[in-house]
Image (cartoon, grey):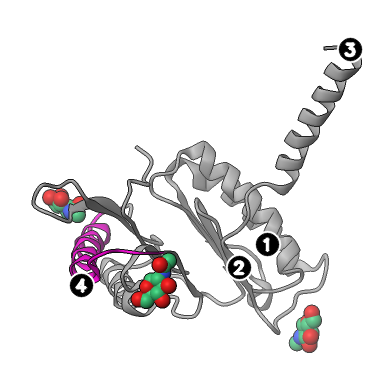
């Protein structure tokens, strides 16, 4: 290979790396408030920026942070961030950095915003939403492939996720992952995950997760994989292991 070809190759490689860094991973979904705006460089924006900065340091060690900042109740943002229960501190931090910069672009000057990634969720609002089940912000994701025996599969999936809902709601981290055999040999399994934001009480975590499980028939009936993703809780299942060890 000539020198110019080698340098050309490295220029391409660096461009690819830069491109990846600039683009990052795509959010799964986001919502912004439609009407409530804050003024640029005003007190709300200053508090929000500070809060997001705090989250970046506070959340990764245990995967969760929540807080509110500001003197004036009219200009006080409430915020929360949660990383998926199986995500490392460094992947959590990477996700939060991405979420923080992306939500600014996607919801400019909006007093409320929420953004989801595979590895984290970031939410803020001018209303105190702590400890309340978020029934507004929600979406479904599904694997379009059908299972061969939907009746049994749906029942088993529901059984697994109901156990995980119970387990998640009774642990301090409010996260549970597990699996269930689909046949006697155990050659096929369904794998699942359930998680709540830790501002919820145990009872409300269970209620939120059970609500999400109740949506499986409309979201993911007989599908090989699915997620009901909300602002307060998430359930997910697949027919392959997807949780990080
Ligand atoms: C907020 O901004 C949007 C445009 O981004 C505008 O349509 C809306 O009227 C604004 N709301 C208020 C209350 O000023
Ligand atoms: C799954 O089944 C539904 C009807 O039961 C059908 O409409 C759809 O095309 C199937 N999807 C795939 C990916 O085979
Ligand atoms: C739920 O927790 C119990 C007790 O720790 C455990 O035995 C069970 O396997 C868990 N369920 C799942 C589906 O992981």
Residue 158: within the magenta?
yes
Q: Which mark is residue 30?
A: 2
Give left or right: position of 92 versus 203. right
Return the disc, 4 or 1, that comes first in the chain's sequence: 1
Residue hosting label 3: 3
Q: Is residue 177 above or below residue 103?
A: above
Which quadrant is the C terminus positioned in? top left
Q: Please determine whether, in this image, residue 137 is positioned above or below residue 223.
A: below
The tag earlier along the polypeptide, 2 or 4, is 2
Q: Which mark lies nearer to you, 2 or 1?
A: 2
Determine the CA span between mark 2 and mark 1.
8 Å
Q: Which residue is mark 4?
A: 151
Q: Is residue 86 above or below residue 42?
A: above
Q: Please report contact status of discs 2 and 1: CB closer than 8 Å, yes or no.
A: yes
Q: Which numbered disc, 1 or 3, marks the residue closer to the eye?
A: 3
Q: Quadrant of residue 105?
A: bottom right
Secondary element at image label 1: helix
Q: Position of residue 16 (x, y in %)?
A: 75, 36
C-alpha distance separating marks 3 and 2? 46 Å
x, y percent for residue 204: 30, 72
* Front tag of 3 and 2: 3
Q: Residue furthest right?
A: 4
Circles 2 and 4: CB distance less than 8 Å?
A: no
Q: Is residue 207 magenta?
A: no
Q: Circle 1 sits on which residue?
A: 103
């Amino acid at each position: 290979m000539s020198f110019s070809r080698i340098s050309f190759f490295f220029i391409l490689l660096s461009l690819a790396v830069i491109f990846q860094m600039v683009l990052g991973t795509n959010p799964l979904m986001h919502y912004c408030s439609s009407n409530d705006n804050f003024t640029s460089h005003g007190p709300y924006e200053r508090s929000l920026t500070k809060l997001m900065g705090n989250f970046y340091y506070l959340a990764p060690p245990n995967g969760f942070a929540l807080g509110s900042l500001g003197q004036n109740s009219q200009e006080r943002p409430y915020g929360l961030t949660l990383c998926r229960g199986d995500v490392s501190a460094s992947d959590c931090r990477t996700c939060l950095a991405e979420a923080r910069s992306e939500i600014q672009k996607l919801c400019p000057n909006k007093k409320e915003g929420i953004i989801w990634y595979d590895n984290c969720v970031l939410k803020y609002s001018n209303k105190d939403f702590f400890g309340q089940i978020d029934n507004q912000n929600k979406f479904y994701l599904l694997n379009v492939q059908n299972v061969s025996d939907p009746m049994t599969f749906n029942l088993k999936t529901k059984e697994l996720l109901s156990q995980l809902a119970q387990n998640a709601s009774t642990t301090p981290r409010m996260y549970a992952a597990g699996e269930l055999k689909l046949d006697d040999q155990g050659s096929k399994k369904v794998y699942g995950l359930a998680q709540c934001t830790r501002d919820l009480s145990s009872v409300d975590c269970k209620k939120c997760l059970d609500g999400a499980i109740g949506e499986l028939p409309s979201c993911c009936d007989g599908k090989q994989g699915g997620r009901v993703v909300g602002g307060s809780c998430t359930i997910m299942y697949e027919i392959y292991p997807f949780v990080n060890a």
